[in-house]
Amino acid sequence: MRNITKGTEPTSLTQHRLTPHSDYDNFQDKTALREALVGEQRGLCCYCLQPIQANERKMKIEHWHPYERYPLERMTYRNLLGACKGNEGQPEADQHCDTFKGVKNLSRNPANPLDNVEAIVHYLADGTITSSDPKFNEELNSVLNLNVAFLVNSRLSELRAFQRALNKRPALLSQSRAGRRKVRQSWESLLTEWEGDSDFGNLKPFCSVIIYWIKKKLARIPA
């Protein structure tokens, strides 16, 4: 999970709210809404960080405050996120993200800067996602099911592939004191590579797992 910076809502959504008898269900320009959500989330699901695309077959429009329980927020842009299909149609135990969440509440919103989910989410060496906030840690499983086997294995696979790639970059593995500054600079460059050097363009799937790992490594290297 990563922090999401909300952009400007589609003009069509703004105009639709001003129309008499308007509601989310009769909003016709959901294509523009999907495109805006995918763009500001840089091509990744708001929860699990799998790739999403701006069409109905490849993503869902997620209401962070559930659609059924918060009618006044159905067209509130800050409440709308882009989510993957979450194994829709499969047994509930195999579902995740919005599909598993349904009408359940989630205490933290990745698009709310005050919630700062990146600061409290951790990735263990076996691919498990956890949180230092006990309530949110419980919700990662009971509300989002982010430790379903498929996602754990996917995160672990990405981490192992990244670790194998490190062997091809010896500058990152140097233990010499003289080369420590260069080692740190190399890790910082790698962090920039994974975070992206701008606010635009798609990020790599499960990128937060690798970013978390790189930051832990940097914390152990003296500045």
Image: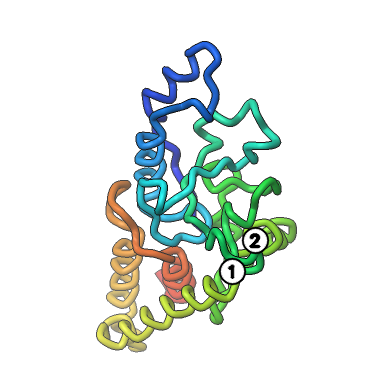
Instruction: Name the residue at 47% across, 74% down.
Output: 154
Residue 135: in sight, yes or no?
Answer: yes
At mark 1, the secondary structure is strand
Q: Residue at x 69, y 46 (%)?
A: 103
Mark found first going from the N terminus, 1 or 2? 1
Of residues 5 and 33, the one nearer the viewer is 33
> Quadrant where the C terminus lies?
bottom left
Answer with the quarter of the image where residue 7 lies.
top left
Q: In the rendering, which numbered label is found on residue 129?
A: 1
In this rendering, is residue 57 above or below 210?
above
Camera sees residue 113: no
Three-letter residue code for mark 1: Ile
Mark 1 and mark 2 in contact? Answer it, CB < 8 Å. Answer: yes
Give the residue number, with chain letter if any, for mark 2.
140
Image coordinates of residue 189 in percent, x first then y, are 29, 66
| Relative side of 182 to 63, left or right | left
What secondary structure is found at the residue carrying circle 2?
helix
Where residue 155 sits: x, y (%)?
48, 73
Label 2, residues with CA under 10 Å away: few <14, some 14-19, many ≥20: many
The residue depicted at 52 percent of the width and 19 percent of the height is 22
Q: Residues within 10 Å of mark 1 (few under 14, many from 20)?
A: many
Q: CA distance from mark 1 to mark 2?
A: 8 Å
Q: Nearer the viewer, residue 73 or 110?
A: 73
The residue lying at 36 percent from left, 37 percent from top is: 31
Q: Position of residue 105 (x, y in %)?
A: 70, 46
The mark found on residue 121 in the picture is: none
Question: In the orientation shown, which residue stands out farthest toward the top?
Answer: 20
- Percent x, y for residue 193? 29, 64
Amino acid marked by disc 2: Leu
Q: Quadrant of residue 180?
A: bottom left
